[in-house]
Amino acid sequence: MSDFAKALRQIRETGEPHPALRPTLSERERAHLPGREGGRRPGEGLSIRDQLEFLRTRWARPSMQVQSAAAPAEILPPGEIESTRFGSHYVVQTVYPHDYFHGKVRLSRFSTADLVTLASLMREEAAVPPRERIVFLDTETTGMQGGSGMCPFLAGIGYFAGDEFHLLQYFVRDFDEEPSMLYSLGERLGRFDLVVTYNGAAFDLPLLETRFTLARLETPFPGMSHLDLLFTTRRLWRSGHGSCRLVALEREMLSFLRGADIPGSMIPQAYFDYVERRPSAALRGVFTHNLHDVVSLAALTVHACDRVTLEPAPLDDALDLFSLGRILENSRDWRRSVQLYEMALAGGLAEPIRKRALENLSIVYRRAGDHERSLEICVRLMAYPEFSMAGYEGAATYYERIRGDLENALRVVEEALSRATTQRVRKLLEARWDRLQQQVIRYD
């Protein structure tokens, strides 16, 4: 069934405006829509006959891709038209040599970075693939709020081939090129096992999955692991850098300052101007913006790996040291986790994070087999004005399992019961007390 036939059936069956009336109307078409009133969406209020007439002329209109493909050199960066069985789209390729520095980070450092640390940075447990199977992804879209009607008109992906960083930008010159672009993008992404994004869990990946589905194309993401650097940077650098925006992180962590760029808020309008045959040099800024985003993802990944693997400096922020200690604890690196927690506490970590660091430290010492040091931390926690379940639990476990001193274990649990602040904690402590009592009776 043709697109026009599908639209005809939808309008006849539902009486609702067809989606094709909304995203791609030119200013001239909007001005001549019958029945259009101020504040009303394009197509809203049209009769079925008017909608059908518009769709008939819309599909009969010559594609705008001829005009776009022949756009002056100052509008689109140098690239190539790529053809697929769904049509064609535009692709720009950029290659960064092995000696390229993005701010203070040399991109080729990725080839020697300890990628095992990526597993500790990911929210999901997954094996880290070889370097050549990792891809960096960022999209530019026709809106900022999400939604199934939003089009990803530019998708940038980057990957390492040897010491070089290759960046491909897939561009939709008009909305009818989206299926072709998605098909080519999906084919390329299918070569990788791990995708790295910035806020991709909430934005890029759900959007692309929706667009793949609407285009009746297989999405490449279900078989891929995902590293969202937004969560990674929040976990690694909790001291706060004023803003979690990628541009701010580039400046503060990578010492990278953007040059010819365009603010993200202006990107949708720059693309609409291009599609509506009002070409502007601003579109080049969109390509530059996307290029910077993708390269920064690679540089931030290198920087994050170094942050986890290199020895911390005493002058590092105490909160950042605590955050890194938690990541290393989760990856079962007890030695370095203890080192970082101790440095964070010595660095003047403020409450209530200081109490949490002590609780974590007591657990790590116990897991590392240093039970005496773990008990010392637990005793400090038991003396805290605020109740610490971890402190009492750790001390009771020490007396019961390490020393076999059930009487002291009972004493610790009884003191904890006198200070417990919630019913849930009381029930846990009561169950432990009953179990210890049964052991005492059995041994007597």
Image (cartoon, rainbow, N blue to C red):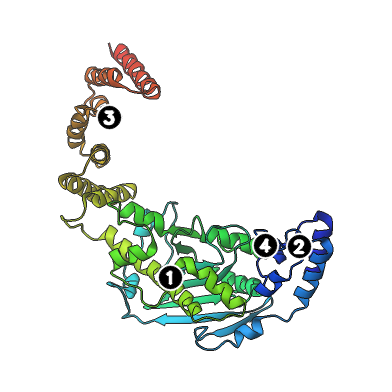
**In this view, 179 is above or below 75:** above
Q: CA distance from mark 2 to mark 1?
A: 44 Å
Q: Earlier in the sequence, mark 3 or mark 2?
A: 2
Q: For the point 45% across and 77% down, which residue is it?
A: 285
> Quadrant where the C terminus lies?
top left
Q: Quadrant of residue 375?
A: top left
For the point 63% across and 61% down, the residue is 149
> Could you say which quadrant of the image residue 242 lies in?
bottom left
In the rendering, at what x and y percent does residue 222 appear?
56, 58
Point out the tag, 1 or 3, that comes first from the N-terminus. 1
Q: Indicate the secondary structure of the residue bearing disc 4.
A: helix
- Front: mark 3 or 2: 2
Viewer-side label of 2, 4: 2
- Crowdedness of circle 1 by 10 Å Cα count: few (<14), some, many (20+)? many
Left or right: 54, with 416 as reference point = right
- x, y percentage for residue 20? 71, 66
Amino acid type of the residue that numbered disc 4 sits on in the rendered structure: Leu
Pointer 2 local density, CA inside 10 Å: few below 14, some 14–19, many at least 20 = few
Q: Which residue is mark 4?
A: 214
Q: Which residue is mark 1?
A: 294
Residue projecting furthest to the front: 38
Q: Earlier in the sequence, mark 2 or mark 4?
A: 2
Quarter occupied by the N terminus: bottom right
Q: Identify the residue position indicated by label 2 in the image.
A: 35
* Mark nearer the N terminus (4 vs 1): 4
Mark 4, other Cα within 10 Å: few <14 / some 14–19 / many ≥20: few
Which mark is drawn over residue 388?
3
Q: Amino acid at mark 3?
A: Ser
Q: Can residue 2 be seen at all in this image of the molecule?
A: no
In screen coordinates, is 158 left or right of 58?
left
**Residue at (45, 62) in percent of width and height:** 197
Pointers 3 and 2 in contact (CB under 8 A)? no
